[in-house]
Amino acid sequence: MKNEISKEQQASYRKNGFLIIDDFLAPDELETWKSKIDFALSERKGQKFPHSKVLTGESDGINDSADYFGKVFDQIINLWKTSTDVKELILDKRIGKMACDLAEVDGIRVWHDQSLVKQPWANATAWHLDTPFWSFSHREALSIWVALEDVTIQNGCLYFMPESNHDTKFDEPGIGANMGDIFNDYPKYKTVDPVPLVIKAGSCSFHNGLNIHAAGANMTAGTRKAMTCAFMPDGSTFNGNKNVLPQEYFESLKIGDVLNNEEQNPLIYHTNWDKK
């Protein structure tokens, strides 16, 4: 695993809000990730969350326009909670340290992982932000996005809007079927050229949760498979959004509570660990 973050990479991420890492996984590691994730997906049988019976593609209370969004990608969330193999991948201290280094925070927790599979001829993902949907508000929240298959312009690669995370807010602009709706809120970026994430299988990217990003339609007869994980800086507090939280846990929280439940959001790295 190519898990060391250089000063140059850190500076690039801090400036642009995203970082691309080629050949993040060695070939044998990539095969391990693919086989473990495929098996975990087969065990879930399309169940989107560990705590509910909603199937991927159905309305889930987060994206209610299931007719369109159900054809964007197959989305299975928190595989780490139902697969010990995936838990080992996602809770890897090395990845946690990478996230800490990029976000410049002392500790990092899993917010949620998700398998994302763009099926052949899948719809595009409109320009959007991540953090405003989540149950906490922190400018340094970020995600890793690992390509399990080659990602091309044709099969629906991601696009990042450089430096946009410095201007965006926690207000939820939504995400709809119209590609450019977000530019009603952030017109500055309507004329900016985005950066496409064209990478080989085993490569990855990190992006800030307030970076404006999108993905194209899959215009091929093949799939585009990725494994992602959103990370929450340690010490983040509940903002009232339910998002992916199980109902019972959600009802136990009040705004301002620290989200430090190890069963829901495990701490995977803290700088203090290296001092012991």
Image: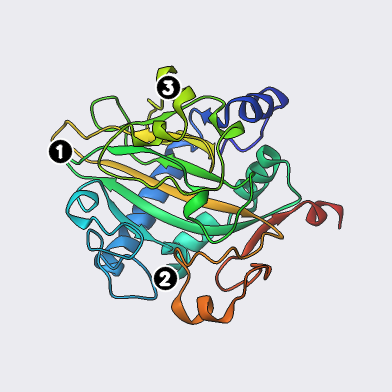
Rendered image quadrant of residue 10: top right
The residue located at (55%, 67%) in the rendering is 240
Q: What label does residue 121 carry, if any? A: 1
Q: Quarter of the image for the N terminus: give it.
A: top right
- For the point 44% across and 18% down, which residue is it? 192
Residue at 46% in and 49% down: 172
> Residue 32 appears at what percent x and percent y?
41, 50
Left or right: 179 as drawn, with respect to 85: left
**Label 2 amino acid?**
Thr
Q: Which residue is mark 2?
A: 82
Crowding at dot 3, Cα within 10 Å, few <14 / some 14-19 / many 20+, comes out as some
Which residue does the numbered mark 3 point to in the structure image?
A: 194
Amino acid type of the residue that numbered disc 3 sits on in the rendered structure: Pro
* C-alpha separation, residue under disc 2 versus residue under disc 3: 36 Å
Local SS, label 1: loop
Report the side of 3 relative to 119 (left or right): right
How many angstroms separate mark 3 from mark 1 (CA)? Answer: 22 Å
Residue 51 drawn above or below residue 126: below
Name which of mark 3 and mark 1 comes first in the sequence: 1
Quick one: label 2 or label 3, which is nearer the N terminus?
2
